[in-house]
Image: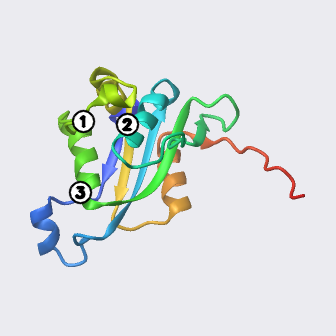
């Protein structure tokens, strides 16, 4: 099941400082998050509500499917995230501890957010490039980007 998949090269905050080469506070992690289509709206509303994006922005904007053809069965995102955000996401995913947020104010419910976290696949690295990390993790999940033609320049 895709929601059971996540990888993290992340140490607890106390250990991060002690390990040579580990990310330090203030450094950004490469994070890839992938949700099934049924949870995309909840994921978008949650990120907007927590201040990670502006209202009206589709956070999970990379369409994915098993064969790279429409329709999208999953949606993904890549972001550069601070350690605190990664810790919060991992805590919610692994331990089921959600941030204390007024989910209803964001247009969703705590139950929907819990279901989205259960279905969420995520990969976090202290390094990694935007395209390479995203595509490699999608491939681990046996998903491919759906390439949409870009309009010709005028």
**Circles 2 and 3: CB distance less than 8 Å?**
no
Nearer to the camera, 20 or 97: 97
Indicate the secondary structure of the residue bearing disc 2. helix
Indicate the secondary structure of the residue bearing disc 1. loop
Mark 3 packing: few (<14 Cα in 10 Å), some, or many (20+)? few
Which residue is located at x 33 percent, y 29 percent? 105
Indicate the secondary structure of the residue bearing disc 3. helix
Residue found at the far bottom of this picture: 20
The reply, left or right, for residue 59 in relation to residue 84 is: right
**Circles 2 and 1: CB distance less than 8 Å?**
yes
Number of the front mark, 2 or 3 = 2
**Of label 1 and label 3, which has the lower sequence position?**
3
Which residue is located at x 11 percent, y 74 percent? 18
x and y, in percent, of residue 102 in the image: 26, 31
Q: Quick one: quadrant of the C terminus?
A: bottom right
Q: CA distance from mark 2 to mark 3?
A: 16 Å
Q: CA distance from mark 1 to mark 3?
A: 16 Å
Which residue is located at x 52 percent, y 28 percent? 37
In this view, 29 is above or below 8: below
Mark 2 packing: few (<14 Cα in 10 Å), some, or many (20+)? many
Label at residue 135? none
**Of label 2 and label 1, which has the lower sequence position?**
2
Task: Determine which residue is flagged by label 2.
Answer: 46
x and y, in percent, of residue 34 in the image: 46, 40
In this view, 121 is above or below 15: above
x and y, in percent, of residue 43 in the image: 42, 35
Mark 1 packing: few (<14 Cα in 10 Å), some, or many (20+)? few
Task: Determine which residue is flagged by label 3.
Answer: 84
The answer to which quarter of the image holds residue 144 is: top right
**Circles 1 and 3: CB distance less than 8 Å?**
no
Label at residue 101? 1
x and y, in percent, of residue 141 in the image: 48, 40
């Amino acid at each position: 099941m895709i929601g059971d998949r996540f990888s993290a090269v992340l140490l607890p905050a106390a250990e991060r400082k002690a390990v040579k080469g580990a990310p330090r506070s203030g450094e950004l992690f490469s994070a890839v998050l992938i949700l099934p289509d049924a949870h995309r709206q909840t994921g978008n509303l949650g990120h907007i509500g927590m201040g990670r994006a502006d209202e009206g922005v589709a956070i999970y904007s990379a369409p994915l499917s098993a064969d790279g053809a429409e329709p999208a069965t999953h949606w993904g995102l890549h972001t550069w995230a601070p350690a605190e955000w990664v810790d919060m996401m991992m805590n919610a995913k692994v331990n089921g501890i959600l941030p204390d947020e007024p989910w209803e104010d964001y247009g969703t419910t705590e139950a929907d957010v819990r279901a989205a976290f259960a279905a969420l696949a995520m990969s976090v690295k202290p390094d990694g490039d935007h395209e390479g990390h995203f595509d490699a993790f999608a491939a681990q999940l046996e998903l491919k980007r759906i390439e949409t033609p870009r309009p010709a320049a005028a």
